[in-house]
Amino acid sequence: MSLGSVGKTRRRVLATAVATAVLAASASFASDAKAETWKYAFEESLTEVQGVFATKFKEEIEANSDYEIQLFPFGTLGESADIMEQAQAGILQFVNQSPGFTGSLIPEAQVFFVPYLLPTDQAHLGRFYRESKAINNDFKALYANQGLELLKMYPEGEVAMTTKDPVRSCADLNEVKFRVMTNPLLVESYKAFGATPTPLPWGEVYGGLQTNIIQGQENPTFFLYSTKIYEVTDHITYAGHNNFTTAIMANKDFYDGLGPEDQKLIRDAATVAYDHIVEYQVGLAETELEKIKQAKPEMTVTVLSEEQRQCFKDAAKDVEAKFIEMTGDSGKAILEQLKADLKATM
Ligand code: 6CS
């Protein structure tokens, strides 16, 4: 059996299990006075950033309507690819999926992996995602083509590399099997950085590091602490090369089938959750890094100097060219709009 067919079989089994679980969950609400239950899956736990966003969204919807939101955190309905399939099929009304996993579905969404495109300044990022024309117009149309109503994109923090050996330059990534999300441009980035990129779903990362199948991965600081990834890596390196972007969307048929008042209810709840999550993350990376240091005092933490970053910055130019090669005029237009939006929100 090929690896691909193993994946498909696993997906089919999972899809059946999911449909059963979702139906059972819906049945348990049958006697509830709520008008309807909307299902919302995301890629993290309830107490992680996507979970905090989802909880706020749920509170807003439930406080302002008779609808109920049922939350499905990471793992309860499968991996990121699984929840996206369920949302596109209309089994779920809402899904939070990072462009890191949307690369094959919407190639232009890979733009968020052009290194050094996004700033590290949180206040700037907060304004950018809120006001960006590329996000609120251009991406909205691209997601719509895939049966998805894009509600918000939001930041989850600067990503750091965590590795078994120290990283002081691109040369230190030579022969390092580095886990990346299943995103072709992210693969190109780590190739350009000198590593051996290994795309994997999140559920395989801790075990992969533990068994040395991979020797590195990247994620925002809060996630390095909450998922205990520091237990299976020894060095944290900040190269300032990216900020983790994520996106919350609704199934488009579901959304289009609602009246204007309910659509406004959803959009308003997403806006409240957005403001909340931007505020929530102020100082979060710092407090979570302190917790990692407490839990594992021998962990090294390095912020690369400008000189040490140079090779990553040089590689960024090739990755940007690769992005345009992969996405053509449509990607080029989005990249230009995004750059203009970043300037406008400085
Ligand atoms: O690296 C990942 O796969 C995961 N990282 C974060 C911050 N959220 C969810 C995603 O699955």
Image (cartoon, grey):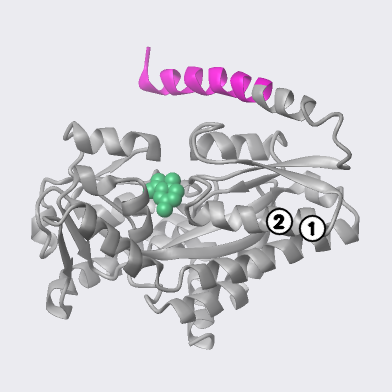
User: From the viewer's perspective, is 63 left or right of 20?
Assistant: right
User: From the viewer's perspective, is 137 left or right of 43?
Assistant: right
Residue that appears at 58% across and 71% down: 134
Q: Secondary structure at mark 1?
A: helix
> How far across and how far down the image is residue 165, in percent?
9, 51
Residue that appears at 55% across and 66% down: 277
As shown in the figure, which amino acid type bears the numbered disc 1?
Answer: Ala
Q: Is residue 320 visible?
A: no
Label 2 crowding class (10 Å Cα cut-off): few <14, some 14-19, many 20+?
A: some
View extreme (top): residue: 1
For the N terminus, the image quarter is: top left
Residue at mark 1: 63
Magenta part of the protein: which range?
Answer: 1-20
Quadrant in the picture for residue 312: bottom left
Quadrant in the picture for residue 87: top right
Q: Secondary structure at mark 2?
A: helix
Query: Would you place residue 5 above or below residue 89 in this image?
Result: above
Contact check, label 1 and label 2, Cβ < 8 Å = yes
Residue that appears at 17% across and 74% down: 310
Cα separation between marks 1 and 2 = 6 Å
> How far across and how far down the image is residue 112, in percent?
44, 63
Residue at mark 2: 59
Residue sitting nearer the eye, 13 or 76:
76
